[in-house]
Amino acid sequence: MMAFLKLYFIALVAFFPLDMLWLGWIGRSFYRQQLGPLMREQTDWLAALLFYLLFLAGIIVFVVQPSLQGEARDVLLRGAFFGLVTYATYDLVNRAVINHFSWTLVMVDMLWGVVLCTTVSWVTWYFGLKV
């Protein structure tokens, strides 16, 4: 359990600033333009917190822990695939059922999921091996 918590803390430290940078600064106007009136004025922080708690646990269980005995390539590939699958699930379902959920939004958000998850997975794996 302590090993999991150590990895979880590393992932949290890596994930939260990156996602806040993307959502709060770099991608904010893009999402506002793409989502229009569907986008909340204020973030529902309870929903965001629940997402972060679950998503980080998924990264640890499905990506980092299985890669601890492997090489960097292993965690990078698993992290990219996990990011693709999880973000594609969200984006493609939204595209299927929500009017005006554009393919541009789908592709940008899925790419962000791959980049974010790959980066967080590698950082967690790397520092998890060091401490």
Image (cartoon, helix red, strand yellow):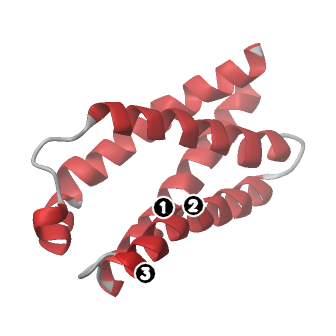
Relative to 69, say whether 45 is above or below. Answer: above
Q: Is residue 79 visible?
A: yes
Between label 2 and label 1, give the one nearer the viewer.
2
Determine the residue located farthest toward the top in the rendered image: 2
Residue 94 point in image, percent of width and height: 40, 72
Mark 3 burial class by Cα count in 10 Å: few <14, some 14-19, many 20+ = few
Labelled disc at residue 86: 2
Instruction: Residue at 61% x, 27% y: name it.
Output: 8
Instruction: Residue at 72% x, 27% y: name it.
Output: 130
Mark 1 burial class by Cα count in 10 Å: few <14, some 14-19, many 20+ = many
Between label 3 and label 2, give the one nearer the viewer.
3
Relative to 111, say whether 17 is above or below. Answer: above
Quarter of image, res 56 = top right
**Circles 2 and 1 in contact, beta carbons < 8 Å:** yes
Dot 2: what SS? helix
Amino acid at pointer 1: Gly
Amino acid at pointer 2: Thr
Q: Which residue is mark 3?
A: 96
Instruction: Residue at 20% x, 48% y: name it.
Output: 24
Query: What is the spatial separation of the Cα atoms under label 3 and label 2, in whole angstroms?
Result: 16 Å
